[in-house]
Image (cartoon, helix red, strand yellow):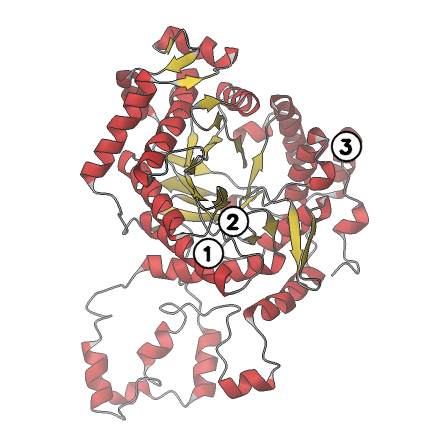
């Protein structure tokens, strides 16, 4: 390699070269992972066998009539104790036929993605009930406008691939139909990514589908491209069906629609304190749901949301940011990958009440573990604070930055003859002894390195002169920039008028246009 080829004329020339090049994304949705394996194959086998023992001998209590109608004539057994038992051979057969990949539709097809193998994607998620405000440093109840704002914020966040409903709308907590319809509408208005909705009333499913059909411009169009994952928690731990969410699960399976089935036992309170025991129970509970769904319609798409959580045994309270939480969620991802199931894992939670150092390390360890272990849909709880009781807009921006860097970690190091750089090293050694101006450095600036969108990399002197801002301060400034002018018009005016005519839409039209809110 000739020394003469690498002269680039200094930093100005390097900037010009970067600006003129077509950028290649450093990270992208669907990176292959699964490098972290906290369980041995023997461990997985033991957990699997014990979970099957539980389903066969203990079963799940309080099965609703709709579940019994679909399961008793297909091999399940209802005991005198009103517990539904699942014979192990039946469970293993249903595990075999459960889909091992799924096309996750988005509102805009450019955001569609195929979930399979160890590919990993990031989604928001959660049911917080309050917003933590930067200015007041205090919590306030969530509103419908907050959902719209969260949707249009996440629409702009590169490393959030799906908009799962990030919090509940407390102002409509007593009117769940209005809540669910408006949560869906706000998502449609604010993003074109795929959406996730938590619905616990089966009577809301048909109206939601009608809403989506109206949005798409015709009856039956949503079924052809179902861009919303609708789900909930059909199991109330330990080992009991919850009526409302179980009805939703059955309805979605009967319609052949993709459903998220989440189980969320807490180690030490609603599950054994041992992490292995908690894994066993959570696996058994989620397997029961997968069995029901596939008995209703063999080969039904089911997001295996096995979410064992952790309790602080000093108080019995939920804790989302512990090392144990990171470990047990990584183990769930590994188990799902072992069976080839489409998985969802929860991470990115913190027990801190604000976006401080505690939030940073708790979110980072749980998200890193979940992604390295190969969770398919990594529900990052981006923005969540206060043991998932609160949500921070600034926090979501910070978590997006963090998620991008963790994706870079997941991507790993590309090793080939070119990247080993023997000729480059030789060229520089016999040249001016510096790599900064070398063509390889220029070429790799945008493809080998991911530059944080928010994190501060100034010198200490620059930082002091610029006001000594923390990442939280910078996120607040960025938030205002992102929200002030970004009011997408994803719902055409005629369609919006039709939706408002037929559904109880409560968000004011002026709140969906540029105003002084930000």
Q: Which residue is mark 1?
A: 363
Write down the quadrant of residue 220 in the picture.
Answer: top right
**Compared with residue 351, is residue 76 higher up or lower down, i.e. above or below?**
above
Describe residue 256's horizontal placement relative to residue 77 as left or right. Answer: right
**Compared with residue 131, is residue 252 higher up or lower down, i.e. above or below?**
above
State how far apart marks 2 and 3 are (Cα).
28 Å
Q: Position of residue 128 (x, y in %)?
A: 60, 45
At 53% across and 31% down in the image, what residue appears? Answer: 232
- Viewer-nearest residue: 399 or 281: 281
Q: Are marks 2 and 3 in contact (CB under 8 Å)?
A: no
At 51% across and 24% down in the image, what residue appears? Answer: 249
Q: Few, some or many C-alpha atoms within 10 Å of disc 2 (few <14, some 14-19, many ≥20)? A: many
Q: Quadrant of the C terminus?
A: bottom right
State how far apart marks 1 and 3 are (Cα).
37 Å
Q: Position of residue 328 (x, y in %)?
A: 35, 44
- Can residue 218 be seen in this snapshot? no
**Compared with residue 149, is residue 254 higher up or lower down, i.e. above or below?**
above
At 38% across and 87% down in the image, what residue appears? Answer: 8
Q: Earlier in the sequence, mark 1 or mark 3?
A: 1
Helix, strand or loop under label 3: loop
Q: Few, some or many C-alpha atoms within 10 Å of disc 3 (few <14, some 14-19, many ≥20)? A: few
At 32% across and 22% down in the image, what residue appears? Answer: 54
Q: Are marks 1 and 3 in contact (CB under 8 Å)?
A: no
Q: Which residue is mark 3?
A: 504
Q: Which residue is mark 2?
A: 381
- Viewer-nearest residue: 404 or 309: 309
Q: Are marks 2 and 1 in contact (CB under 8 Å)?
A: yes
- Viewer-nearest residue: 26 or 176: 176
Q: Earlier in the sequence, mark 2 or mark 3?
A: 2
Total numbered labels placed on residues in the image: 3
């Amino acid at each position: 390699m000739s020394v003469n080829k690498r002269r680039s004329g200094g930093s100005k020339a390097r900037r010009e070269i970067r600006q003129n090049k077509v950028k290649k994304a450093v990270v992208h949705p669907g990176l292959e992972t699964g490098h972290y394996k906290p369980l041995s194959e023997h461990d997985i086998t033991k957990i699997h066998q014990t979970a099957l023992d539980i389903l066969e001998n203990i079963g799940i209590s309080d099965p609703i009539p709709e579940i019994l109608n679909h399961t008793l004539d297909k091999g399940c057994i209802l005991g005198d104790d009103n517990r539904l038992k699942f014979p192990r051979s039946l469970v293993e057969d249903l595990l075999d036929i459960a889909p091992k990949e799924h096309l996750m539709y988005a509102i805009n097809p450019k955001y569609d993605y195929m979930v399979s193998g160890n590919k990993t994607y990031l989604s928001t998620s959660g049911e917080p009930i309050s917003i933590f405000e930067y200015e007041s440093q205090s919590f306030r109840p969530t509103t419908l406008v907050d959902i719209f704002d969260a949707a249009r914020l996440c629409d702009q966040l590169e490393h959030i691939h799906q908009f799962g409903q990030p919090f509940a709308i407390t102002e409509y907590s007593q009117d769940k139909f209005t809540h669910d319809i408006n949560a869906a509408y706000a998502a449609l208005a604010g993003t074109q990514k795929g959406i996730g909705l938590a619905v616990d009333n089966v009577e809301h499913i048909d109206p939601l589908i009608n809403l989506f059909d109206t949005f798409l411009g015709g009856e039956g169009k949503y079924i052809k491209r179902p861009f919303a994952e609708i789900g909930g928690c059909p199991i109330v731990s330990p080992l009991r069906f919850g009526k409302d969410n179980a009805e939703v699960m059955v309805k979605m399976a009967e319609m052949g629609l993709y459903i998220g089935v989440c189980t969320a036992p807490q180690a030490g309170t609603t599950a054994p304190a041992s992490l292995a025991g908690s894994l066993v129970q959570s696996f058994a509970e989620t397997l029961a749901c997968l069995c029901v769904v596939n008995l209703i319609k063999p080969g039904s798409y089911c997001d295996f949301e096995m979410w064992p959580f952790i309790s602080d045994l000093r108080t019995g309270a939920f804790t989302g940011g512990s090392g144990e939480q990171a470990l047990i969620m990584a183990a769930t991802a590994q188990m799902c990958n072992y069976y080839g199931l489409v998985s969802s894992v929860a991470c990115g939670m913190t027990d801190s009440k604000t976006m401080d150092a505690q939030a940073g390390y708790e979110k980072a360890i749980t998200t890193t573990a979940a992604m390295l272990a190969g969770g398919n849909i990594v529900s990052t709880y981006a923005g969540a604070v206060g043991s998932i009781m609160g949500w921070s807009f600034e926090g979501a921006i910070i978590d997006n930055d963090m998620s991008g860097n963790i994706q870079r970690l997941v991507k790993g190091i590309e090793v080939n003859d070119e990247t080993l750089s023997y000729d480059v090293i030789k060229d520089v050694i016999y040249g001016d002894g510096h790599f900064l101006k070398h063509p390889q450095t220029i070429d790799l600036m945008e493809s080998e390195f991911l530059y944080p969108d928010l994190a501060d990399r100034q010198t200490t002197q620059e930082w002091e002169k610029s006001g000594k801002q923390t990442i939280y301060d910078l996120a607040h400034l960025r938030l205002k920039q992102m929200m002030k002018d970004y009011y997408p018009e994803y719902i055409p005016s005629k369609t919006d008028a039709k939706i408002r005519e037929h559904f109880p839409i409560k968000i004011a039209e002026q709140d969906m246009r540029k105003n002084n809110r930000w």
